[in-house]
Image: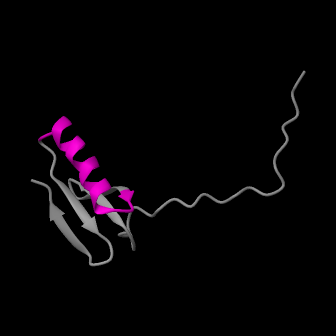
Amino acid sequence: MKKQVTLPDEVAPIKAPRADRPPTNGFVTVVDGHFKSPFDTVEEAEASAQKLKLAYPMLQIEIYDAVTKVRTLLS
């Protein structure tokens, strides 16, 4: 016997950030030239970037400030 599938009346659209556009607010880690995780503060972004750099020292990791549009290389 097949089970009847019920769907909600309204499905909420997924608000995923576009990979081909830079973010407009906050801070983002940039790994080898690709935007990755967004953060609200620079401290959160730097902490995440430091963990990545310790685990994978060969990566080039930057912190992107979306408001001033400046990338800072993590050293």
Q: Is residue 18 left or right of residue 53?
A: right
Q: At 40% across and 61% down in the image, what residue appears? A: 19
Q: How many marks?
A: 0
Q: Quadrant of the N terminus?
A: top right
Q: Is residue 60 above or below residue 58?
A: below
Q: At 88% across and 34% down in the image, what residue appears? A: 4
Q: Is most of the magenta stretch helix, strand or loop? A: helix
Q: At 23% across and 61% down in the image, what residue appears? A: 63
**Among all residues in the image, which is located at the extreme left?**
75
Q: Quadrant of residue 34?
A: bottom left
Q: How is the image coloured?
A: one colour
Q: Is residue 36 above or below residue 52?
A: below
**Among all residues in the image, which is located at the extreme bottom?**
68
Q: Is residue 4 magenta?
A: no
Q: Is residue 24 left or right of residue 53?
A: right
Q: Is residue 31 above or below residue 20?
A: above
Q: Is residue 52 magenta?
A: yes
Residue 74 appears at what percent x and percent y? 14, 55
Residue 57 appears at what percent x and percent y? 12, 40
Q: Is residue 40 left or right of residue 71?
A: right
Asked whether 2 or 61 is in front, the reply is 61
Residue 29 appears at what percent x and percent y? 28, 56
Asked whether 6 or 69 is in front, the reply is 69
Q: Quadrant of residue 46?
A: bottom left
Q: Quadrant of residue 72?
A: bottom left
Asked whether 16 or 74 is in front, the reply is 74
Highlighted magenta segment, given as a residue range: 38-57
Q: At 12% across and 42% down in the image, what residue appears? A: 58
Q: Is residue 74 above or below residue 26?
A: above
